Structure formats: structure tokens, C-alpha cells
Amino acid sequence: MIGDCRTEEDIPHTVACRALGVSTAWFCKWRRRPENPTKREVRRAALTRGIKELFEASGGTYGSPRITLDLWAEGRQVSRNTVAEITAEHGRYGRKPKKRRSLTAPATGGTVNQAQAEELVKEVLLDIVPDADLTETDAQADLRQELELDSMDFLTLVERLSARAGCRIDEDDYPRMATLAGSASLLAERT
């Protein structure tokens, strides 16, 4: 196009380069390029075809890291960055794998009702305070006062319940965790 400006329109190539936002040095280099592609260009074209084939064979799910591994398995010497660059140039982005969602709580094996949640809270409390008599503990009583739990014991209770029930217990939930009934109802809701 720039070369045609000189022959057809009598516009100097420096003016055409400036109008198109191309450096004059690049144009001169391009004009002096060999008629046949260089070895590097041939290798790059073959690599691009290989990447395209692997991408399409995967159904469009492989990204550049997986394609790089497959190319290495074929015995090709190629850089991860080169594969990433070529896949990005051609808009070939692999799909992110779907995050597996578990429908059951990992520690309990399923949803927990209020009675099961209360038993779980009692088990964890007995681990923390082994000599506690939970049979006479009021479900609405403050566990900290009733069982004389300090702040570290309470945090241990929260952490163990979270781990055993397989649910997240945030700081905002701590007031609700103050009683046996509140802890059990929170676990029953979350699992």
C-alpha cells in the first residue's frame, strides 16, 4: 500500500508512512524482505498450525499451558511464552474448568437437622471442656458463662464446628453462637 502510493499517486513514502503511523525504517526493512519466508517465519507458521489443531481437537477447552505441554510431548521445542503469544494473537483462550460444587457437607455426609446439629455442638464442647455436664445446660444459656469458656476456648469451638460441619462461620455469627440452641440452628441452616 505504501509502495503503491509512490508509483500511483506520486506521494513520497515518508509522507505515506507518517499518515499511516508506520515508521519509515520499518517500511524500508519490509520492502527489502526476501521473496520467500525466512526459516523463522516457516517455523512460526507450522507452530501456529499445530496450536490451532490442538486447540480445535480439545473442543476449544485447552489454554496455552496445556497446549504447551502437548507440544512438548510431541517433541517440539517451544517456549511457554511463544505459545501464549500465538494463542492470544488468534483469540484462542481455553475455558476455565468448572468449579466442582459439593451438595453435601464434607464432615457430616449430608444436611443436618436441628437435633443432629445440637449433638455436634455438644461433642465439640466436650472436646474443649471434658468435665462439662451438658445434660443440665440450658439451650438458651450463654455458653461462655455457663461453661466458663474464655475467648480462646470460644474461638476453638467456632473453628472446630466450622471444620466438622464443613461450613464457614464468620465473626458476624459469633453472637448467635453464644448459646447451644443458636449454634445448632446456625449449623442446621448452613449445612
Image: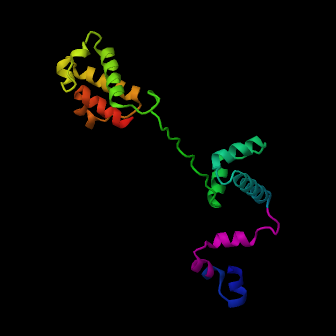
Res. 23 visible in picture: yes
Residue shown at the point (22%, 27%) measured from the top left: 179
Quarter-of-image position of residue 123: top left
Residue shown at the point (66%, 56%) measured from the top left: 86
> In the image shown, does 185 or 5 lie closer to the viewer?
185
Residue 10 coordinates in the image, percent (x, y) = 68, 89
Res. 79 visible in picture: no
Q: Quadrant of the C terminus?
A: top left
Magenta stretch bounds: 16-37
Above-or-below relation of 88 to 165:
below
Viewed as shown, does residue 129 lie left or right of 99? left
Quarter-of-image position of residue 49: bottom right
Q: Is residue 21 magenta?
A: yes
Q: Residue furthest right?
A: 36
Above-or-below relation of 32 to 38:
below
Residue shown at the point (31%, 23%) measured from the top left: 157
Quarter-of-image position of residue 133: top left
Above-or-below relation of 51 to 126:
below
Residue 187 coordinates in the image, percent (x, y) = 34, 32
> In the image shown, does 129 or 55 lie closer to the viewer?
129
Its colouring scheme is: rainbow
Q: Quadrant of the N terminus?
A: bottom right
Q: Residue furthest top?
A: 131
Q: Is residue 17 magenta?
A: yes
Viewed as shown, does residue 118 lie left or right of 138? right
Residue 152 coordinates in the image, percent (x, y) = 26, 21
> In the image shown, does 178 or 184 lie closer to the viewer?
184
Viewed as shown, does residue 86 lie left or right of 18? right
> In the image shown, does 185 or 89 lie closer to the viewer?
185
Residue shown at the point (25%, 28%) measured from the top left: 181
Above-or-below relation of 103 to 140:
below
Residue 124 coordinates in the image, percent (x, y) = 34, 20
